[in-house]
Image (tube, coloured by chain):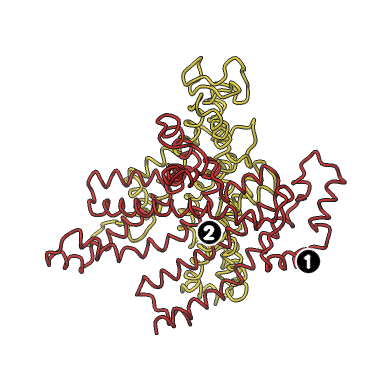
Chain colours: A red, B yellow
Amino acid sequence: MKVNRLLKYTAKRIVDLIPTLFLVAVIIFMITRMIPGDPASTMLGPQASVKEINNLREQMGLNEPKLHQFIEYLKDLVHLNVGYSYVYKRPVVDLIMERFPNTIILTLFALVISLVVGVTAGIISAVKKGTWWDYVFTILSLVGVSVPVFWLGIMLVLFFSVELGWFPSTGMGDISLGFSDYFSHLILPGVTLATIPMATFSRITRSSMLEVLEQNYIKTAKAKGLQARWIICKHALKNAMTPILTVLGMQVSSMLGGAVLTETIYSWPGMGRLIVDAINKRDFVVVQGTVLFLALLFVLVNLAIDLLYKVVNPKISLGKVAK
Amino acid sequence: METTEKTPSLVKMFLKKMLQNKLACFGLLMIFLIVVLAIFAPLIATHQPNVMDTGATLLGPGQDGHLLGTDNYGRDLFSRIVYGSRISLIVGLGAVAVGSVIGILLGLVAGYFGGWLDSIIMRFMDALAAFPFILLAITLMTVLGTGLINVIIAVGIGNVPGFARMIRGQVLSVKEELFIEVTNSLGAKQARIIFIHILPNCLTPIIVYATMNVAGAIISEAALSFLGLGIQAPTASWGNILKEGKDYLIVAPHIAIFSGMFILLSVLGLNLFGDGLRDALDPKTRA
């Protein structure tokens, strides 16, 4: 019965997403076609002749009426065609599919680090409230949410690569050279990308745990003589997870954005690096295609987290929500 | 006998709470220092920020009268960072002004009128919020081109959905208040109800949110300049100083270290102050 309601709710949320996804596509179209400035002359640069600009405009269909351009653009999107790169001489979808797994590996690795370290730090802070553990983690998390990832990345390279020589500073590593080579390349970008979410999870977990630890059922569990570790892991953390899940979606979004900067610093061959390279080569078709893809991905990730939230949080009635 | 014990005013309670919060005071101090740097940059800077000295490139901190050393063109790093604070503050405040004005207007209209107008505006806001913030700014900058005004617009637009959502939520609750019903029944014009009666009652959370967003806008500007899309050299901005410093990380790490430290301290200051402001304005935590 509950599964049925969950399926209904999922179907409703997917239908609700359609206008949002449509508007995401409209915004990208508006940004690239309506704003003053000619994409063709931007791509070709100030040295380009009028003839060259006109030729590219023709190829890109920019000389057609805006409505016609929009309909063609939507038709292409339905066919999963987000444009053709005149710089790479390849469809943008191919470029995205080539780089996407690398970004996912980096983002997931960073997500795992941020959740494990952030939640653990938050639990210790809450359980040891008022001790120096609490102060240290609180200050670290305050600094963590304020640190610019691109600066942190550079500092980590300076310290761990240049000074200590522990980790490579750039590239992705080669799995054929062994797991350790691949993993060593992943550490610094992963930690860099994980820092802000880690600090956020730590803050959220601390405040959520403090609230839960004051509840009567925790006091009862303590009075019954249950082990502190058991109470924290089995009872308190489970109920403190809901706010963490709430911010998870936002953090994934910020990580997808942060990946652009992190991948630039570490020359990680992912979507972010693709965007920055495309900017430098004035290949705005790749920029718009990649950004559109990431925005759609973000919408879907949020949907997945929302569904997870409903499954984990028994207080929310799916029946009422699904109406 | 009458008791004449006075209850402290809200302003006094707010100030007391702020002063009790040491982290918020520390944040305010940092903001104050950055603002002083920005306003009095010509007096504080020890050198002209864009003047090159090819005989004094990549000097370390304290060498040849250069407090924080020099960059690859021999320009005084301290002076460039001091002038860079102006760009950060202008973009931080400008982008939040753009985002808040547009967002507040849209949120007021959506929340007050409701119906199809609300649906259209909020759907549009949902779609805008679907873009990771920095990616939206990057996309806008690739089309708009580099420059201060364009950075303010690009970062400002990214701020719009947050303000719109927040103010809409506030309006939905304030418009149900009795005083709004009374004002309505007295025949007040809708514009007057919205701007004179509803808006001032929605501003408290907006102030906190705006403070936090200034920090976000400063980071965004630095990120765009770091990627080469924001403020262009020779104009000094913390982001483009850091970008240049990255290329000289081994021989002159001080360039990247100091420029990034200023970004971190200003953002940390704003976040600490914003946290304190939120706690002081939260009715639940008022003593």
Instruction: Tell me the residue at 48%/66% (across/down).
Output: B170
Look at the picture and state if A16 lies above or below B248.
below
Q: Residues within 10 Å of mark 1 (few under 14, many from 20)?
A: few
Q: Is residue B273 something one can see in this rendering?
A: no
Q: Secondary structure at mark 1?
A: helix
Q: Amino acid at mark 1?
A: Leu
Residue A92, x across and y down, in percent: 67, 55
Tell me whether circle 1 and circle 2 mark residues in contact (CB < 8 Å). Answer: no
Look at the picture and state if A159 lies above or below A210.
above
How far apart marks 1 and 2 lie (CA) works out to 30 Å
Q: Amino acid at mark 2?
A: Gly
Q: Is A90 in front, or is A161?
A: A90
Q: Residues within 10 Å of mark 2 (few under 14, many from 20)?
A: many
Q: Is A134 in front, or is B101?
A: A134
Q: Is A310 in front, or is A320?
A: A310
Res. A67 mark: 1
Residue A105, x across and y down, in percent: 48, 53
Q: Is residue A43 something one can see in this rendering?
A: yes
Q: Which residue is mark 2?
A: B162
